[in-house]
Amino acid sequence: MSRIHAATTSLLLGIAPVAIASLAGCGNGGSDGASAPAQVFTVTYSVEGMHCDGCVAAITNKVKGLKGVTACEVSLDEHRAVISMADPTLEPTIEETIKRLGYTVAKPTS
């Protein structure tokens, strides 16, 4: 048991400097030249014309394949898609992608 403890301690001591070094720039206002975490924009669309899980999969796969899209959740029951992206200027591209699949897409009015 002491060999296992010694090996685990050696492993952890070897990892600790790497973990500490990777955290060194956190919370310093970016003074080390590191960029801030990217902001994520989330948009909810109403999507009409879906009738099966294949429709959901088609939309999900196409939208997730777009560069800058970070998440896509499509609900057949609620006729909606909730899409997160790195840049809000992707919205027209996302809408066009869904339309090209044969669905009607719009931002619901609140």
Image (cartoon, grey):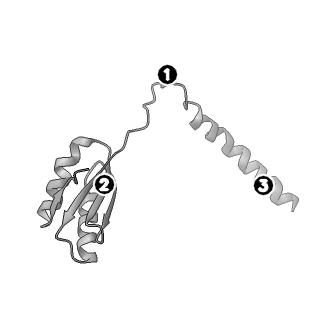
Instruction: Tell me the element at label 3.
Output: helix
Kind of residue indicated by mark 3 = Ala
Residue 7: mark in rendering: 3
Q: Going 16% across and 48% down the picture, which residue do you hit? A: 92
Asked whether the residues under the numbered discs 2 and 1 touch, taking CB atoms below 8 Å apart as contact, a structural biologist would say no
Q: Going 64% across and 37% down the picture, which residue do you hit? A: 20
Q: Going 31% across and 57% down the picture, which residue do you hit? A: 82
* Cα–Cα gap, marks 3 and 2: 45 Å
Kind of residue indicated by mark 2 = Ile
Give how far across and how far down residue 35 sits, in percent: 42, 31
Q: Which residue is mark 2?
A: 83
Q: Residues within 10 Å of mark 2 (few under 14, many from 20)?
A: many
Give how far across and how far down residue 12 sits, in percent: 72, 48
Give how far across and how far down residue 107 sits, in percent: 21, 52
Comes first in the chain, label 3 or label 2:
3
Give how far across and how far down residue 6 sits, in percent: 82, 53
Left or right position of 21 against 29 = right
Q: Which residue is mark 1?
A: 31
Instruction: Tell me the element at label 2.
Output: strand
Along the viewing direction, whichever of 99 and 109 lies nearer the viewer: 109
Q: As displayed, is residue 39 above or below residue 47?
A: above
Comes first in the chain, label 2 or label 1:
1
Q: Looking at the rendering, which quadrant does residue 106 occupy?
A: bottom left
Along the viewing direction, whichever of 95 and 3 lies nearer the viewer: 95
Along the viewing direction, whichever of 34 and 89 lies nearer the viewer: 89
Q: Of circles 3 and 2, which is in front?
A: 2
* Cα–Cα gap, marks 2 and 1: 32 Å
Asked whether the residues under the numbered discs 3 and 1 touch, taking CB atoms below 8 Å apart as contact, a structural biologist would say no
Instruction: Tell me the element at label 1.
Output: loop
Total label count?
3
Kind of residue indicated by mark 1 = Ser
